[in-house]
Image (tube, rainbow, N blue to C red):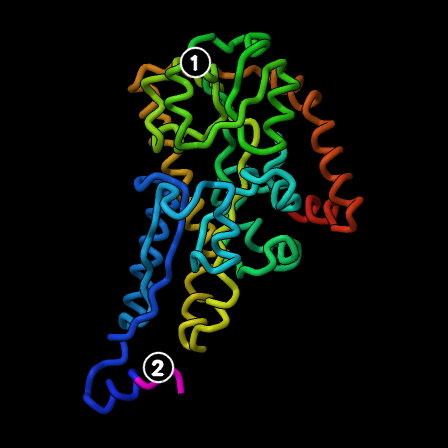
Amino acid sequence: MTIKKSLCLAALLLGVAPAAFAETLKVSTFLPPNHAFNQMLTQWGEELTEKSNGELTIELFPSGQLGPAPRQFDLARTGAADVSVVLSGATPGRFPMAELAGLPLTYPSSGSISAVTSRRLTELAPEYLADELEGTHALWMAVTPPLKLHTASKDPSDLSAFEGMRVRYAGTIWQQMIEILGASPVPVQPAETGDALSKRVVDATAFPFEATKAFDLGPVLDYSIEPGLASAAFAVVMNQATYDGLSPELKKLVDDTTGPDRAEAFGKMLDEGEAAARDYMIEAGVEMVGLSDDQMTTLKTEFAPILDTMVSEVDATGAPGSAFLSAYTH
């Protein structure tokens, strides 16, 4: 008998509720405390606590306290954290299938809003993403509203303005998109973007509006392009051993409070946050620049080789890249 079981038995004999020996999940994110991910994880934790009568709780470690964005998956895989939020593009090539959900101007037929894309990717995760998330149990996937390009000084009404710019990016897809625009992609950790912009280490950045608010970038930006051009895919994963070690009742509770419904709810939160953050940017004096239909058609043509190449590369490994993309965009 384990020490924990012995303590629980002793507690029962003394008339003390077993919930006194609650299981606490260590949850890691690289995002600032006010970010939607942390808000949703806090809500999820409160739900777990209530429905388990205190037997299952979470402790949230935001802002990269346990490690930066590229380390988040390994934190969960190795058990250094029980749950972590993984940005697929933070480690280019490691999650090639999930990255396909962020291809430029590529979305499910039912829409590009996060409530739609996040639910669809979560529905497909068990069939298509299990291999690249090995060692973890996927709780839900998330796809951001399409990221916009934001510039610190130059008016991007004419896309040629990007030629020669240094643009902060995350992931192979955005790296290629930025190069096609004639700019130089510069890898900068999300939390360091404001400093990089203010010091002109970079001239522009790719973020959804929600992230510009979370990182308070309004004061260092002058223009934002609409609509967004490509999304970023995330995974919320639990260490597999942690998941397997839960009691059947707690495991069912985790299953019942995650999955496609949680993904859609989180997507709605992102969509609402996106609208509010757009207002934040306008209030900060950032000018919105709308792309014309002709500009969008040109971009779709110029970005098409990215899609073809990335899908072909995934297929070449034996993974079903084409089948996944077809299912995702259906």
The disc placed on residue 290 is: none
Residue depicted at 43% across the width and 60% down the height: 82
Q: Can residue 116 be seen here?
A: no
**Is 309 left, or right, of 27 in this rendering?**
right
Sequence-first tag of 1 and 2: 2
Look at the image and say whether residue 219 sits in the magenta stretch: no
Disc nearest the viewer among 1 and 2: 2
Q: Is residue 158 above or below residue 205?
A: above
Q: Over which residues does the magenta segment extend?
A: 1-6
The span from disc 1 to disc 2 (Cα, nearest Å) is: 56 Å
- The residue singled out by tag 2 in the image is 3
- The residue singled out by tag 1 in the image is 200
Front position in the image: 251 or 51? 251
The amino acid beneath tag 2 is Ile
| Residue 9 location (% of width, % of height) | 30, 88
| Residue 120 location (% of width, % of height) | 57, 49
The quarter holding residue 223 reads: top left
Q: Secondary structure at mark 1?
A: loop
Residue depicted at 46% across the width and 48% down the height: 85
Q: Secondary structure at mark 2?
A: helix
Q: Is residue 93 above or below residue 280?
A: below
| Residue 49 location (% of width, % of height) | 29, 65
Local crowd at mark 2 within 10 Å, few (<14), some, or many (≥20)?
few
Front position in the image: 127 or 165? 165
Residue depicted at 70% across the width and 29% down the height: 306
